[in-house]
Amino acid sequence: MVYRVIIEKGQDFGYVMHCPAIPGCHSQGNTIEEAIENIKDAIRGCLSVLDEEVSVSAKEIGAMEVEV
């Protein structure tokens, strides 16, 4: 999957990255390259946690698809 990320120059050092599609998914790095690798890891970690949460919720209350 492809996710849009926002990169900013850090106030104290390096670069800070955010993935707006995943609330709370942020990372940083000393270089742009390091920040990119770190946000990739952060995205994977966030998606893993979200997947576990959805699995637990789906077992508890059920899940379905609806067409709009």
Image (spheres, helix red, strand yellow):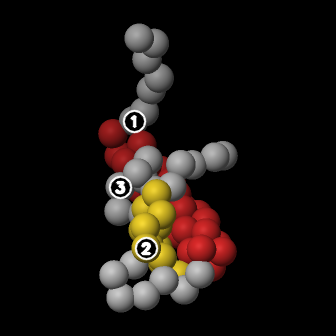
Q: Which label's residue is closer to the chain start, 1 or 2? A: 2
Residue at 63% x, 46% y: name it. Answer: 2
In this figure, which residue is indicated by the disc labeled 3? 23
Amino acid type shown at disc 2: Lys
Q: Residue tagged by mark 1? A: 62
Could you tell which of marks 3 and 2 lies nearer the N-terminus? 2
Quote the CA–CA distance across marks 1 and 2: 43 Å
* Placement of 11 over or under 47, stated as above or below: below
Q: Residues within 10 Å of mark 2 (few under 14, many from 20)?
A: some
Residue at point 45% right, 26% down?
Answer: 64
Q: Position of residue 56 (x, y in %)?
A: 41, 53
Residue type, mark 1 in image: Gly
Can residue 14 be seen at all in this image of the molecule? yes
Q: Which mark is residue 48?
A: none
Picture quarter containing residue 58? top left
Q: Please, what secondary structure does the residue beneath circle 3 have?
A: loop
